[in-house]
């Protein structure tokens, strides 16, 4: 169970980092930042970041569960 928790934590952190980098690249690009619909695009990237956070928190919960046994 601890191995699964470590993997879930690592995958969650990776998803969050990718989402953050995509959001940063998208908003600093001169062409994309001029698009009027940037709000909905940013919400999509924020959803990706929050997905990564929730997977990472699940990994931490699995680790704590494995350590308590």
Image (tube, grey):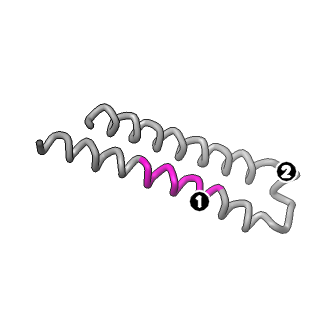
* Cα–Cα span, label 1 and label 2: 23 Å
Which picture quadrant has residue 47?
A: bottom right
Please indicate whether residue 49 sits to the left or right of residue 68 in the image.
right
Q: Main secondary structure of the magenta part?
A: helix
State the quadrant of the C terminus: top left
Quick one: 49 or 55, which is closer to the camera? 55
> Is 10 rendered above or below residue 32?
above
Percent x, y of residue 57: 36, 51
> Mark 1 touching mark 2, by CB under 8 A?
no
Q: Residues within 10 Å of mark 2 (few under 14, many from 20)?
A: few
**Which structural element holds mark 2?**
helix
Q: Residues within 10 Å of mark 1 (few under 14, many from 20)?
A: some
- In the rendered structure, which segment of residues is drawn in magenta? 45-55
Percent x, y of residue 34: 86, 60
| Residue 47: numbered disc | 1
> Is 10 rendered above or below residue 26?
above
Quick one: 51 or 31, which is closer to the camera? 51
Q: Which comes sooner in the sequence, label 1 or label 2?
A: 2
**Which structural element holds mark 1?**
helix
Asked if the stretch drawn in magenta spans residue 47, the answer is: yes
Quick one: 34 or 11, which is closer to the camera? 11
Q: Residue furthest top?
A: 3
Please indicate whether residue 61 sits to the left or right of residue 43 in the image.
left
State the quadrant of the N terminus: top left
Task: Give the foreground label among 1 and 2.
Answer: 1
| Residue 30: numbered disc | 2
């Amino acid at each position: 169970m601890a191995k699964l928790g470590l993997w879930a934590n690592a995958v969650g952190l990776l998803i969050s980092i990718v989402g953050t980098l995509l959001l940063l690249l998208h908003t600093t690009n001169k062409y994309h930042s001029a698009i009027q619909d940037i709000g909905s695009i940013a919400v999509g990237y924020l959803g990706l970041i929050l997905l990564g956070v929730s997977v990472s928190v699940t990994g931490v919960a699995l680790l704590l569960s494995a350590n308590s046994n």
